[in-house]
């Protein structure tokens, strides 16, 4: 009876494949990356929330991205870190926890695309219709678009994971660094054709929608910039659009690699590495791209550091006079 309960309620996750000699360096590197993701993204959210001059639609959308990156990294990385020093055969996890982890992994990736779509629309309105920007991109509009981004992702991912959860299970080993939807339905011996169709359909819908919206938006922005003779406007447009495109390219490349490699079993090790990088590289790079490349944010960060410096210098001068 205990064995039956164990088979039904507990699964084994392969986790991060490292040798005993490389487990410590891998743990330290992954921990440092996780700390950087948390500190940089949370710091960006706090900075934007505290500085009233940054309470603008573009920066509020940055908050959406940073909160999602913190959520995605926290759902995946701590579990991988906790299993690094545990033998693969003993990396147990309750099935319910595995389902939650799979949901969080797909939810994070889906929200990243929907938020980037909204950011592309924001840039389109700001550059192509600047006189109406304040009336279109109001705080109410940003809130409504943000709720849409999170709600549509919740619905699509909820249905996806729900289709896999309803299946009976005949296996208990997940050959992946963490739980995802493919890992869940591979535990079953039933026909998973419907899940394959829905999963691919959802991926095509999200990736296709984001690609089309971003391409059409930036083609329109490029046409406006080419017709405009204002060099300052064109320079500002290129700067803000370039950061958005870099972030989108990193996310799109990571997602496509994972989806493609799932169709090639002999490249499973490459797929596992790509799956981890999807939830590490994008959150880490977003904080750098938006935190340091956006001029207004960069200036606020510099000001915050300079506020402390004069006080220290002043104390030293007084001591010197004494």
Image (spheres, grey):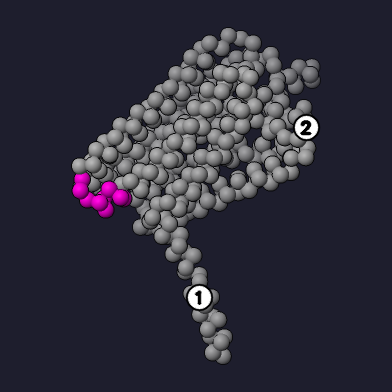
Q: Residue 136 occupies which quadrant of the picture?
A: top left
Which numbered disc covers residue 34? none
State the residue position of label 1. Answer: 311
Tell me, yes or no, if residue 144 can be seen here: no
In space, the residues marked 2 and 1 are separated at their CA atoms by 53 Å
> Measured from the top left, where is residue 273 in percent x and y?
61, 32
Judge from the rendering whether residue 128 lies leftward or rightward of residue 38; answer left or right.
left
Residue at image coords 79%, 19%: 3
Which residue extends farthest bottom?
322
Tell me, yes or no, if residue 110 can be seen here: yes
State the residue position of label 2. Answer: 87
> Measured from the top left, where is residue 153 in percent x and y?
45, 30
- The local crowd at label 1, few if under 14, some if 14 to 19, many if 20 or more residues have their Cα within 10 Å, is few
Residue at image coords 73%, 29%: 92
Total numbered circles: 2
Q: Main secondary structure of the magenta part?
A: helix
Magenta stretch, residue numbers: 228-236
In this view, the residue in front, 274 or 56, is 274
Does the segment drawn in magenta span residue 235?
yes
> Measured from the top left, where is residue 229 in percent x and y?
20, 48
SS category of the residue bearing label 1: helix
Which one is earlier in the sequence, the residue at label 2 or at label 1? Answer: 2
| Quadrant of the snapshot with the N terminus | top right
| 250 in relation to 139, above or below | above
SS category of the residue bearing label 2: loop
Residue at image coords 38%, 43%: 242
Residue at image coords 33%, 46%: 238
> Measured from the top left, where is residue 91 in percent x and y?
73, 30
Does the segment drawn in magenta span residue 309?
no
Judge from the rendering whether residue 107 lies leftward or rightward of residue 118; answer left or right.
right
| Quadrant of the snapshot with the C terminus | bottom right
- The local crowd at label 2, few if under 14, some if 14 to 19, many if 20 or more residues have their Cα within 10 Å, is few
């Amino acid at each position: 009876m205990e064995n039956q309960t164990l088979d039904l309620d507990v699964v084994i996750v392969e986790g991060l494949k490292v040798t005993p000699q490389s487990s410590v360096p891998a743990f330290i590197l992954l921990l440092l990356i996780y700390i950087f993701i948390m500190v940089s993204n949370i710091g960006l959210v706090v900075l934007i929330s505290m500085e009233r001059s940054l309470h603008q639609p573009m920066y509020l959308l940055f908050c959406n991205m940073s909160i999602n990156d913190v959520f995605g990294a926290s759902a995946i990385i701590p579990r991988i870190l906790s299993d690094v020093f545990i033998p693969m055969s003993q990396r147990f996890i309750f099935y319910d926890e595995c389902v939650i982890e799979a949901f969080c992994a797909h939810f994070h990736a889906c929200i990243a695309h929907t938020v980037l779509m909204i950011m592309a629309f924001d840039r389109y309105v700001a550059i192509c219709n600047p006189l109406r920007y304040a009336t279109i991109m109001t705080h109410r509009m940003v809130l409504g678009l943000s709720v849409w981004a999170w709600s549509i992702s919740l619905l699509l991912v909820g249905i996806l994971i729900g289709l896999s959860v309803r299946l009976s299970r005949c296996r208990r080993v997940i050959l992946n660094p963490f739980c995802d939807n493919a890992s869940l339905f591979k535990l079953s011996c039933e026909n998973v054709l419907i899940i394959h169709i829905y999963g691919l359909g959802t991926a095509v819908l999200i990736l296709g929608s984001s690609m089309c919206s971003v391409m059409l938006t930036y083609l329109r922005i490029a046409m406006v910039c080419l017709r405009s003779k204002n060099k300052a406007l064109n320079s500002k447009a290129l700067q803000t659009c370039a950061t958005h495109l870099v972030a989108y390219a990193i996310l799109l490349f990571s997602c496509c690699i994972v989806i493609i490699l799932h169709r090639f079993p002999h490249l499973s090790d490459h797929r596992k590495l790509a799956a981890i990088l999807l939830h590490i590289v994008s959150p880490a790079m977003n904080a750098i791209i938006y935190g340091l490349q956006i001029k207004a944010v960069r200036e606020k960060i510099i000001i915050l550091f300079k506020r402390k410096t004069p006080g220290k210098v002043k104390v030293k001068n007084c001591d010197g006079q004494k």
